């Protein structure tokens, strides 16, 4: 997944996009992960998906949304790769980027 997100970032870098848009991966205090990906000026910029969460337990959960040109994925401490996979699934579904 890391190689894939690197390639997606590379494909969107055009000398301008990367100066105003970003990918942010942070930890949260619950503990878990927050991944934010700016979709402005990408093929996904008009996509809108309300927040959805799958919560099996306090320690096993993942959620995401696409709002205001931003993908936000969150999850428990073991869900970083799954969050990136969720984003990849959206990209594959709506753009065909592989």
Image (cartoon, rainbow, N blue to C red):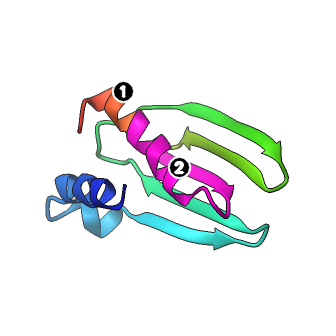
Q: Which residue lies furthest to the right in this view?
A: 58
Q: In which quarter of the image is the C terminus?
A: top left
84 is within the stretch colored magenta? yes
Residue denoted by label 1: 93
Would residue 7 be found to the left or right of residue 49 on screen? Answer: left
Which residue is drawn at the image coordinates 72% and 38% (left, top)? 54
The CA span between labels 2 and 1 is 16 Å
Q: Is residue 39 visible?
A: yes
Q: What element carries label 1?
A: helix
Residue 11, given in percent of the width and then of the height, sits at: 18, 52
Which residues, given as a range, are shown in magenta? 69-89
Q: Is residue 69 visible?
A: no
Residue 46, given in percent of the width and then of the height, sits at: 41, 32
Of 3 and 13, nearer the camera is 3
Residue denoted by label 2: 82
38 is within the stretch colored magenta? no
């Amino acid at each position: 997944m890391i190689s894939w997100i690197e390639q997606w970032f590379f494909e969107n870098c055009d000398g301008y996009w990367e100066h105003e848009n970003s990918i942010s991966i942070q930890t949260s205090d619950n503990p878990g992960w927050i991944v934010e990906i700016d979709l402005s000026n990408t093929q996904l910029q008009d996509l809108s998906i309300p927040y959805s969460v799958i919560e099996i337990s306090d320690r096993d959960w993942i959620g995401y949304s696409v709002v205001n040109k931003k993908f936000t994925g969150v999850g428990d401490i073991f869900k970083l790769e799954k969050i990136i996979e969720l984003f990849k699934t959206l990209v594959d579904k709506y753009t065909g980027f592989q």
